[in-house]
Image (tube, helix red, strand yellow):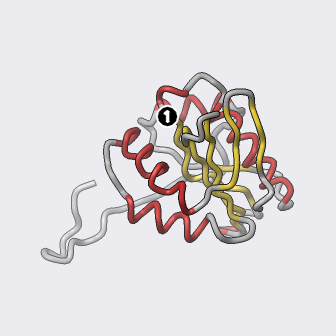
């Protein structure tokens, strides 16, 4: 995994390093409006340090992180054959429309294909039009699974919260 490093004109894609996590966390906070440094440190430990798990970053020619993507091979949930899953993607709003996201998507798909899977999946909120548009532009479409959910009881009241 450490050998992934691809140059694309104004930026390159490479494996994330621990030193990148403050920049990734800051970029995510810019995109989502929520700072989650502990979450990103945990994500790096879980996905940036193990085989068949990928935490990639894009950096510009000045070495500034302008994007990230995370995925892995997951197997056999509810009868699903092994598939690649992408579950985190972010691109600096100033760097969008420069093929940063598309290039990271291609790079992680190449990694997942080398791991032996022939399918990639992701899950999005219905109202997430930005990411929905992006993933559809990459050729992704609705798959054979349906996400189900329900609220859990709160510890204080023991009652379920409204959906």
Looking at the picture, tell me which residue is in the foreground, 6 or 90: 6
Place of residue 116 in the rendered image (x, y in percent of width and height, measured from the top left): 86, 60
Going by the picture, which residue comes out furthest to the front? Answer: 62
Residue under the point 36% across and 62% down: 150
Residue under the point 38% across and 39% down: 30
Going by the picture, which residue comes out furthest to the top? Answer: 97
Residue under the point 78% across and 55% down: 112
49 vs 58: above or below = below
Place of residue 19 in the rendered image (x, y in percent of width and height, measured from the top left): 54, 59
Q: Image quadrant for the C terminus?
A: bottom left
Looking at the picture, tell me which residue is in the foreground, 61 or 76: 61
Left or right of residue 156, residue 82 in this image: right
Left or right of residue 106, residue 160 in this image: left
Place of residue 128 in the rendered image (x, y in percent of width and height, measured from the top left): 45, 36
Left or right of residue 117, residue 58 in this image: left
- Disc 1: CA contacts within 10 A as few (<14), some (14-19) or many (>=20): some
119 vs 44: above or below = above
* Residue for badge 1: 92
Looking at the picture, tell me which residue is in the foreground, 2 or 139: 2
113 vs 79: above or below = above
Going by the picture, which residue comes out furthest to the left? Answer: 157
Q: Image quadrant for the N terminus?
A: bottom right
Helix, strand or loop status at disc 1: loop
Quarter of the rendering containing residue 64: top right
Place of residue 49 in the rendered image (x, y in percent of width and height, measured from the top left): 65, 70
């Amino acid at each position: 995994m450490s050998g992934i490093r691809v140059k694309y004109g104004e930026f390159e894609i490479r494996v994330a390093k621990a030193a990148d996590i403050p920049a990734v966390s800051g970029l995510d906070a810019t995109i989502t409006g929520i700072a989650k440094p502990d979450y990103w440190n945990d994500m790096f430990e879980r996905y940036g340090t193990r085989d068949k798990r990928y935490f990639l970053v894009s950096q510009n020619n000045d070495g500034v992180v302008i994007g990230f993507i995370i995925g892995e091979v997951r197997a056999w949930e509810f009868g699903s054959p092994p598939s690649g899953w992408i579950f985190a993607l972010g691109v600096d709003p100033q760097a969008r429309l420069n093929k940063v996201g598309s290039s990271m998507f291609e790079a992680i798909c190449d990694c997942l294909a080398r791991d032996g899977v022939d399918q990639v999946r992701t899950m999005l909120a219905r109202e997430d039009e930005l990411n929905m548009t992006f993933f559809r532009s990459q050729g992704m479409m609705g798959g054979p699974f349906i996400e189900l959910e329900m609220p859990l009881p709160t510890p204080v009241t023991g009652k379920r919260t409204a959906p």
